[in-house]
Image (cartoon, helix red, strand yellow):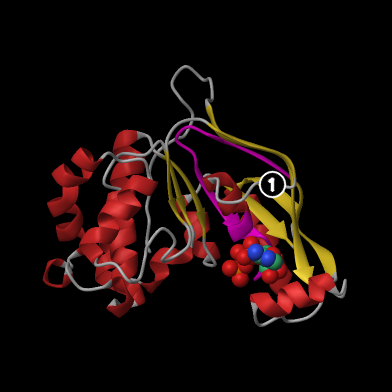
Amino acid sequence: MALDFNRDSAPSDGKAEPMIVVDHVDMVFNIANEQLNSLKEYFIKAMKRELFFREFKALQDISVTVNRGDVYGIVGTNGSGKSTLLKIVAGVLEPTRGTCTINGSIAPLIELGAGFDPELTARENVYLNGSLLGYSRQFVDEHFDSIIDFAEIRDFVDMPLKNYSSGMTARIAFAIATATVPDILVVDEALSVGDFLFQEKCERRINELVNDHGTTLLFVSHSIDQVERVCQKALWIEKGVMRMNGDVKEVCEAYRGLQQ
Ligand SMILES: Nc1ncnc2c1ncn2[C@@H]1O[C@H](COP(=O)(O)OP(=O)(O)OP(=O)(O)O)[C@@H](O)[C@H]1O
């Protein structure tokens, strides 16, 4: 996506309003030492006390504050913990240690297909996903046509989602998440599966939310150029540890240094 935000995040009275406060967060996953293929196998191993787990620290002591109107990027190499942090911010994961405080409504676009049932039709999924986002049935009724039109899936609205391509699923997810004006929009690379026309459309919608409505944006991108172009600030996480947090140019320059 070629996002372009021409706004200064600092409010006119000079007081920053924290929207996301991540405070000394650790995330530990318990990983089984061997691959188990069924629940039965799991219980047999557990009964025999042959089930062993090791702890894996995906995030260690991460602290960051995102203020109202900030467009904040998260960079880091594969597996460094970016998506895990977004899931904590979105409330999908509970941190093992530390806290994450959110001020206002949040629209998460983090895992393609999350909040959808593949056996249900797109129409039914719009209602399902809408309710998960806290929309009332009346709200979804009123916005249903605009969601379907934005996603450009009218011809397939009564087809089960399992027959949709990943790009089509991304279209519905984005259309639902941005049907309302969220205080905070959290975007992982879920949109990268959309075609270029839809990415441009999403980009316009995100620009509108950020520039016209003061939505705070936290997003993960593997494109350093994009992060540098659109963000004022960035967080660099490497192997679960915060390497740098601050001015986007400085963070991106340091991150680029990894290639040398
Ligand atoms: N539910 C889970 N159980 C066990 N390990 C997990 C789980 N979720 C993530 N991890 C591990 O945590 C680490 C961080 O994963 P994460 O998806 O947050 O990285 P990322 O920076 O988003 O990577 P990428 O750039 O490849 O998308 C990885 O080593 C991953 O294997």
Residue drawn at (79%, 80%) of the image: 34
Residue drawn at (45%, 31%) of the image: 104
Read off the magenta span. Answer: 62-84
| Relative depth, front residue between 118 and 90 | 118
Look at the image and tell me whether residue 51 can be seen: no
| Relative depth, front residue between 196 and 29 | 29
Please indicate whether residue 191 sits to the left or right of residue 73 in the image.
left
Look at the image and tell me whether residue 174 can be seen: yes
Q: Please name the amino acid that badge 1 sits on.
A: Pro
Tell me the residue that label 1 is attached to: 95
Residue drawn at (74%, 47%) of the image: 96
Residue 78 in the magenta stretch? The answer is yes
Q: Given the current orientation, which residue lies at the most extreme right position?
A: 49
Residue drawn at (85%, 71%) of the image: 52
At which x and y percent is residue 145?
13, 53
Ligand 1 quarter of the rendering: bottom right
At which x and y percent is residue 41?
72, 80
- What crowding class fits label 1: few (fewer than 14 Cα within 10 Å), some (14-19), or many (20 or more)? many
Q: Is residue 15 above or below residue 167?
A: above
Q: Secondary structure at mark 1?
A: loop
At which x and y percent is residue 69?
44, 35
| Relative depth, front residue between 38 and 105 | 38
- For the C terminus, the image quarter is bottom right
At which x and y percent is residue 50?
87, 75
Residue 66 in the magenta stretch? The answer is yes
User: Which picture quadrant has residue 237?
Assistant: bottom right
